[in-house]
Image (cartoon, rainbow, N blue to C red):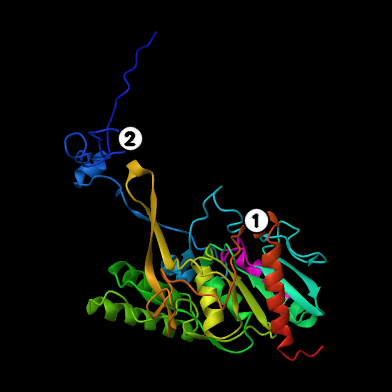
Amino acid sequence: MNSYVIPWRKSGIGIESQGPLPSPRRGKGRIFSPPTPASPADAAVGGSGPALAAIADLPVADNTLPSYLEPIRPLLNVSVPKPQYTILGFGARAPVYRLPAGFAVRLGTQPSHFFFSGTYVSNGVRIGFIRIPTMAPPNAALALQQLDQEIAFFNASTDVLVVDIMRNPGGAVSVVEAFAQRLFAQPFRTVGFEIRATAAWLTAIVEAIDNAQSQGAPSEVMQGLRAIMKEILAAFNENRGRTAPVPLVNYSLTLPPAPNAYTKPLLLLVDELTASGGDMLAAIIQDNNRGPLFGMRTMGAGGSVSSFNCTVFTESVCSITSSLMNRGTVVSNTEFPPSPYIENVGVRPDIVVDYMTNANLMSAGGPFVQAFTDSAVKLAQATVIPH
């Protein structure tokens, strides 16, 4: 029989007290011992291993982005995590309510369908419906192709379009703006971002410029990236914390519509769980008077989201934003002071209707569906629509 000696190499941060929850007031007055080197290599350079609260940026799903934007991809993240088993329908393709009798489903029956869509008729008005579950499709190019096909159909076959972004956790700035371009028939203003001016973001934008130049990016892209760099550099040197509002993807705060954008009246459904990129699309629709918002105030979750482990002993993950969404106009309401920002404020609906009621719970959203259907009918009837 052979004997083996298994070395016990300890690393990390030792816990010196215990209990229901570690606390600085327990035990010897501190819960952590000084960190020990994680490896001989770390010890050689005087390090202590990976940082306890290192930022792990959430991935931005958009396969339409050019590779030279990779260094600033984390800035484009406008999403919140989807908690499992806690919120019904959060980020789900199908709507949380039951659609009315006679609803004809178009998208939503195949695994490859990103959207849920269809049509129905009420009081002689042809109503189109499309649900956008998130702003982070697994395949952005395919999702845009599907949306283009649906918009072409809706332009030809409907009088009004209901767009559902309830319980939408957000996604990527580029996807939000691409979706918005298919809902506007005229140029419109997008949301600007006040970036937290740090050396890290300054380095990232310089790297993006170098990559773009080496890959032969168009002149308008080079001009746009350099404008963002100059603004970050100015804010950094002037120690003002944040930049002025800048575009992150299309290098202009005024965007053109898609060639075959939807041209008829539009109603946007929002709720308290319309988050981040969902907030952004709601603000774009409202600020450009594209159509009324129906539902409840959006979450106000913000943009350029990064997450990190906020101390191991709590097993918690914290999210912070590296920018502030600026709507470009000061919005006033009775709940908050006048502000151009979306963070912690959200976007107020034009038509306030609460889905979270007992009546909706007991009838799969029947009163809510009837209410937005009535609003869509009124919206269509108030507009002269050629058939």
Number of numbered discs:
2
229 or 298, which lies in front?
Answer: 298
Q: Quadrant of residue 129?
A: bottom right
Along the horizontal axis of the image, is 222 left or right of 84?
Answer: left
Q: Is residue 105 above or below residue 54?
A: below
Point out the stretch of residues depicted in magenta. Answer: 132-150
Residue 373: where, in percent of width, then height?
71, 73
Q: Which mark is residue 20?
A: 2
**Residue at the image position 70 percent from the left and 78 percent from the top:** 376
Residue 267 in the figure: left or right of residue 55: right
- Furthest toward the left, the residue is 28
First in residue order: circle 2 vs circle 1: 2
**Quick one: SS at disc 2?**
loop
State the image coordinates of residue 100 (x, y, percent, origin top left).
77, 65
Q: Which residue is mark 1?
A: 361
The amino acid type of the residue labelled 2 equals: Pro
Picture coordinates of residue 142, whole percent (x, y): 66, 67
